[in-house]
Image (cartoon, rainbow, N blue to C red):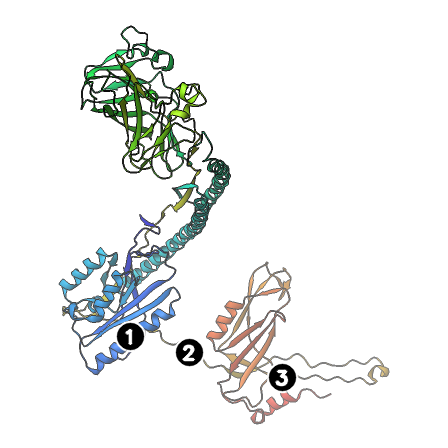
Amino acid sequence: MNKYCPRLQKSLRLYCVVTLKKKGEAMAEVQVIKASEGKVNRRTGKVIQKLRVAAYCRVSTDSDEQLNSYNSQVTHYTDLIHKNEAWEFVNVYADFGISGTQTKKRTEFQRMIKDAKNGLIDMIITKSISRFARNTIDTLEHVRDLKENGVTVNVTTTVVSSAEEAETLRKQNEAAATSAGNQVASNNTVLAAYDKTKKASDATNADADTKAKELQGKGVSVTTAEKEVSSAEEAEKITSQNKSAYDQAKQKQADWQKKYDELQSKTGTEGYTKQVVLQALDLSASNPQATHGSSAAGSQIVGTRDIGSTTGSSGYGRILDSTGVFKYANVDKGWTTEIDYTNLKGLTVTTTDGQKHDISRIHRTFQLVNTGATGLNDVYIPNDPTEGFIVARNNGTGSYSDYMNFLVTDSYYYTVNGKEVVYSASQDTPIALTYSSLNNNPIGREGARATGDGSSMVEINGSTVSVHGDQFAYSDNYNRQEETGLNWDTTDSAYQYKGAAIGVFTQGSSFTTEFVQWDGPADPAGQTYWFAINTRVVAPVVETPTSARLTKTTVKPTEVKPISASLIKTTVKPSEVKPVNVSIVKTTVDPVSPDPVSAELVKAKNPEKPTLELTKLADTKNQQVSVAYHDYKLSYKPTVTKTVTDTDKKNTDGATVAKNTPQVYTLDHDNIYANIKVGDTITIVDPLEAGATPVVAENEADAQAKGWTVNYDEIQETYTYTAVYQGKKLDAKGQTEERLKALQGFDK
């Protein structure tokens, strides 16, 4: 089964046409041996309305006879192609005076093959396969080459020994052609439906492109899906769905733009970021039920009240809700671990297609870059990923030159169709992480910065934390409650932004933050430092712009049956064994010559002469009796009959004739044409009998076969017979006395 669609290549056809003629005869009609039909251009994918037809001609000598054949072929095929309304003329490729044994030398042949490969020709006709290529090797080579390019060559020949065999094959060809014609009609119906669907699909896609361009101009993130349709109705339904998506996106984007404009207007207001921050990550929901696993050995599970405490009295028990904490004791510079957080709830990412996905897993790596002057550190990692991590160190040198720092890298995963996918950030869908609780007090100073390409730091108006030239965000001065006058470092404080900054990532699928702690002048026995990683932004941000998902359509490939008509050309079996000769037998029909129309005098049987019986003298007053008889009538040869059908069961010729019974009358004429001669026209007007139905076709055929012309006037219901007289001359003056007497009639 061949498929017809804009993306599907379709076979071209090479038609081999055999023309048979005798010397001196005009070019005869051609017999076409078809290969497979096609309707779609294999290069453009467009439906072909007309077959693009070319012809190939070749003669091998420059004799006058061959020159005449060459010119005759060119003229014949040019006219043949132009006369066929289903064909479009391409060209006649003609090589003159060139042998057919080497096709490489035939420039026109090579040009034709090239044009066929380039999809410019749908059908090639030629006088015979020998015109195409005489050399067997060349024939096979070109056939193979053309087939590789979708061109089919098909030639079938059979030898017949009798007219009956030829007639049988003719009927087979006729049946094959009829079947192919029916299939063409069926295919045309299918292709018409395809064209309708394709038109509707194109309209849907054009509308989708227009809507997408408009939405994108408004800042909407537009993605397109593709759906195969099999009817115009399906395409129109998708157009309606696209309109609904367009309308919704347009309204949502208007709402989003309003919010964005509002934030933009407040970029100088305390508690707001100094620039509008977009956010595609939601890492704000607490996840005390989350589970985490570690790649590093030597960890132990402790509670939040055990963080930095040997007595279980740590204050972290009041501010953290994690149910389990990994403790890594006495880790040194270069220590690393990988943590997978699972069983997560309420954490999402929004992809560029506008779809929001639940985060199924967070993969986080920790690397201790520098331990500080105190040496070994203790690291605590809660099971809730939004609570970051805590590090404990002993007192250092009391100088900012004494510091410890960590690299923490996050990757966020979600599932699509059951498969895990890592999230990738972009300019339209960035990730913004909040670094909060960045304290500066006598025991030390805490800072953070987003690292890597596409990362930046954003300040919050009114925060004690500022972004410095090295992109580290920290407070230059002490920011305790006694300095700020606000208790900002609690989970329920409205002033959390006082010790926070934001890191933004616009590219990549892994996001690294560097955390640092510089030692302060105080001399405690030891202290812990908390580094939070989440999106619990006290400063407002705006989610990513509205997204719209529009659907474009493709047309389901239309399946049509390949059309093939296996036609058979015949050659006549030779009467003796000779080199291959084709005996062309032409048949003629002896002309039918009707007998000349003639007439002769036939003795007529006349009734008795009328007598007048007088009863009284008054009866004879002003009375005259005049009767004319003809002793002879004209009888025409050959005899012409007329058939009618009785319709009313009236009495006809003394007998009741059954309804619809045919009746046959012989044409004669009682009027004598005096002096009639050869070449004169005889006209007989014969009205249709009452109650009779004419059998026009049968009467016309019968009369015309006998030399008469018949016309039937349906309105007057009258036959008119005409013929040219071919008999002997009838001269009224030279007739016998008896004949003259008959012509004069009776005395009064």
Could you tell me residue 135's position as x and y percent? 14, 66
Residue at image coords 15%, 64%: 138
Label ID, residue 630: 3
Q: Position of residue 317 (x, y in %)?
A: 35, 11
Q: Residue furthest top?
A: 311
Q: For the residue marked with disc 1, what is the amino acid?
A: Val
Which one is in front, 226 or 514? 514
Query: Can residue 601 be seen by looking at this rendering?
Result: no
Crowding near pointer 2: few (<14 within 10 Å), some, many (20+)?
A: few
Asked whether 233 or 31 is in front, the reply is 233
Tell me which corner region of the image, top left, top right, bottom left or bottom right, holds residue 27: bottom left
Image marks 3 and 1: residues in contact by CB distance under 8 Å: no
Q: Residue furthest bottom?
A: 733
Using the rendered image of the protein, determine whether residue 346 is visible from the camera's viewpoint.
yes
User: Can you say whether 287 is above or below 247 in the image?
Assistant: above
Q: Amino acid at mark 3?
A: His
Give the Cα distance between marks 2 and 3.
34 Å
- Residue at (60% x, 92% y) in the render: 737
**Disc 1 target residue:** 74
Q: Secondary structure at mark 3?
A: loop
Q: Secondary structure at mark 2?
A: loop
Three-letter amino acid code of the residue under disc 2 = Ser
- Residue at x 45% of width, y 29% of height: 271
Separation of marks 2 and 1 at Cα, in angstroms: 40 Å
Residue at 42% across / 35% down in the picture?
274
- Give the residue number, with chain letter if any, for mark 2: 593
